[in-house]
Amino acid sequence: MDNNKYHSEVDFAIRIGGEGGEGVISAGELFAQVAARTAYHVFTYITYPAEIKGGFSMIQIRIKDGKIYSMGSSVDYLIAFNQQAYDRTISDLKVGGTLIYDPDEVEIKDNHKATCYPIKLTKLVVDATGSKLGKNVVALGALGHLFGIEFEVLEKLIKDRYGSKGSDVIKNNLNALKAGYFTGKESQWERKFQLVADADAKEHYMLISGNEAVALGAIAAGCRFVAGYPITPATPIFETLTDLMPKVGGRAIQLEDEIASLSACIGASFTGEKAITPTSGPGLQLMGEQLNLASMLELPLVIVDVQRGGPSTGLPTKTEQSDLKFAIYGTSGEAPRVILAPSSVEDCFYQTIRAFNISERLQMPVLILTDQSIGYRKATVRIPDFSKMIEVDGSKLTDEILIPSPERIEIARRIEIDPEKLNGYKRFLDTPDGVSPITTPGLPGGQYLSGGLEHDETGKASYLPDMHLKMMRKRFKKLETLSNALEKNPPEYEGSEEAKIGVIGWGSTEGAIREARLLAEQRGILFRHLHPKVLSPLPERQVRHFLAGLKQVIMVEENFTGQFAHFIKAKFGVKPIEIHKSEGVPITPEEIFNGIEKVARIVDETTIARL
Amino acid sequence: MKRQLQDYKSVIEPVWCPGCGDYGVLTSLQRALLNLEIAPENIVTVSGIGCSGRLSHFLNSYSLHGTHGRAVPTALGAKAAHPELTVFAVGGDGDGLGIGGGHISHAARKNVDITYLLIDNQIYGLTKGQTSPTSPVGVKTKTSPHGVFEDTLAAIPIFLAYDVSFVARANGVDTKSLTQILMEAISHKGMSIVYILSPCRTFPLLDSKGLKAILQPLPEDHPRGDKLIAMERAYSDKPIFTGIFYQVEKPTLEDRLQSVIKKVCEKSNGGDKYSLDKVLKSFA
């Protein structure tokens, strides 16, 4: 499988839309599971309402013969359970696509030059089971037939999924599945593509969400302590970790709120454990004071913020990149911390390992910013080879430690003081890289006082003017240390050196920007794309190198005010054109391309001539 | 080599006001630890904000002086991660009954094996005399210049209602009894709260003489396992009882976590822990 190929023989997207509570998402996830067991890559995108029942809900599954970077800009197959699903998404259906709909529910106003296949989902499920529940399984059956999936494969899937719910539930679901499968067969829908299972693909890949990838990354990094409080859309990280921790001998504890959760992580880290707490914006805000404390105590720990639409309760189930400023600056006083932003489901796994490595080595909190779209997105991810995992010791903060990859995973821990050298031990000793020796409870003679009050190198409270300045410098020096190490990493940008336009994005928009670059290149517009994974501190020389020679910088963000743009403007004095999307849904490659095309008309004379 | 009381003193000299009840608390704790022969390196002390929060500075242990009200969940994390350590949470009436009051019930539900020293002086002393949740009705403070108009919080009944598995009240000035109670609290398997009345000399609402007059040890035959009798005696204000009101045995947080680990691994992996590879393959 060619992971990086842009032009594909196989590349299509299926969208199922309906009402929340109708099982649209579970049907789509089951279908994605089948698709993931073929030779193809799978990428899902989910949007669901904040209510348990009601509201518009949909899942989109993209299937491709190479690595997938975004959900794409349009769909090839649309399955509409009701009028709302049709009305809201028909414009996304490609001309010549396939529309599957329930004719008792949906009135077609414009078929969008699509091939239309009616299927009476509600009637079929009532006839088959006597209940309206299970429309989704009828649809799964119909889709399964359309893509030539063997009935037995689907049958097993249903049994696995509903196995714990008793024989009646399985029986009804299988009847619903049959009704859909054989209706599709009898109606002789035209099969455009066949999904054939591939045992090899099943062996080396997992189909996981970004949230699951974070949880697995934490386990891989050696984290054995999670304390958390449920919050949408970060809850699946906590759920996954509460399931996995006991399996690996770790501890998972639900606390009474986010303040207590981060407090418990601080306590655990103080005793030497790697600790994590998953949350979303409102929870991060509650954690502010304890985040400050962790920075002041110089304790390693990892906080994951799966961002959602804000402010306040905002859009709990929708995506947004709007906690960046709070993550970088949001505390009383000035407390250094590191901000990472994974850019794909797979990257969630590796950046989480990296977060632990950085946090342990720099003795400071690291925040991972993901968002709802990446958290709930599922993608096929290759299972890394753990024979290539190395536990690193020694005191060097090497570049390799900073970027784990499928080829090389290094696991770092805080560097504890040699017990022979405890004489004169100062927990907060000022050192050239800012990182001090540390002891953990249990070590005789290593006792120390650590506190949120400003303190001297021994930990004793001190309010002397010189001491405050000295310790502020010491704590912030660690960011410099990291920034210098990042400079030695391979540059995090791609695209032509000749380009006059540069696009900067962060986090989950990477795939969409990458695909926008493909669209642009097809039309002769060149740009280079910087997508830093460590947002703060930035490797400034690398960013300056990226900016050199550009006529215009474009910044793409899913928020209202341009938070990363503010940061870049302040640091590098550039005046970017900003593309913001603040609608709760991810930006598409086409939307980005449209913006870039407009800029290209102004910036690049040669492009103007061609267009 | 046998340890001395000195071994439990940190290099930092206490800075409380002369005559402060907190001196008695510190000494009693040091004595209790010495008597129980707990090594300083195996002690974690997490304290909150206020005069009492400074206690962690003066005790030779792995000491964490944290934020206002969060000593209990922080101590909980330390104990959950490393159950072999002896873990203390220390805070005052503002810390534990005001800003951080919400944490106690949940720590009690988990029965985390920590000892919480809640040192009550009925006033916010460090910030020079504002109303606390236990300031008596009618007294004038900096933030109740016309007299406190809220009811006083009754701490012991709350802890009993939360089903904290060890609940005691002590006179901070009576170091002999306090040492005894602390030794029992530390030895108790599960969450113990020792609620200590500690007079503030600078903003005196409690004074040691007055305390002596109204305090009375619980009857010798007080049944520790009977919550209703404990509750009745907890509400008594003449006299105010001291001693161990309530003590029951129930699984600690560590017991509960271990039983989950055992159950999960036995059920799905023949009793062994999962390898990393197996964890990831379960998502294939």
Image (spheres, rainbow, N blue to C red):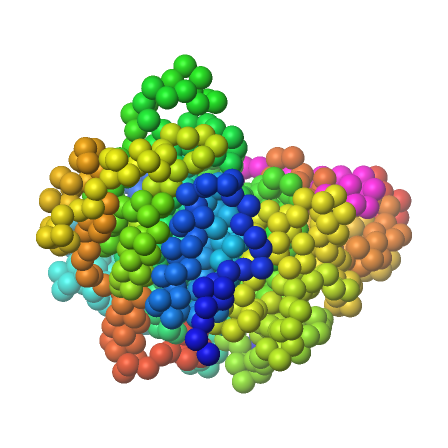
Q: Is residue B246 above or below residue A351?
A: above
B97 left or right, relative to A278? left
Q: How many marks?
A: 0
Question: Residue at the spot x=53%, y=53% of the render?
Answer: B57
Residue A258 screen position, x and y as percent = 43, 47
Q: Is residue B205 above or below residue A127?
A: above
Residue A428 screen position, x and y as percent = 66, 60
- Asked if residue A580 is among those painted magenta in the image, a careful observer would answer yes
Front residue of this view, candidates A474 and A17? A474
**Does the image show residue B137?**
yes
Quadrant (top left/top right/bottom left/bottom right) for the C terminus of chain A: top right
Front residue of this view, candidates A371 and A503? A371
Question: Residue at the spot x=48%, y=50% of the render?
Answer: B55
Quadrant (top left/top right/bottom left/bottom right) for the N terminus of chain A: bottom right
Question: Residue at the spot x=87%, y=53% of the render?
Answer: A548
**Does the image show residue A105?**
no
Q: Quadrant of residue A460?
A: bottom right
- Asked if residue A439 is among those painted magenta in the image, a careful observer would answer no
In the displayed image of the protein, which residue is found farthest to the top? B146
A387 left or right, relative to B133? right
Residue B185 screen position, x and y as percent = 29, 58
Front residue of this view, candidates A333 and A4? A333
Front residue of this view, candidates A248 and B79? B79
The segment highlighted magenta reads: A567-587
Question: Residue at the spot x=66%, y=48% of the render?
Answer: A462
In the displayed image of the protein, which residue is found farthest to the bottom? A387
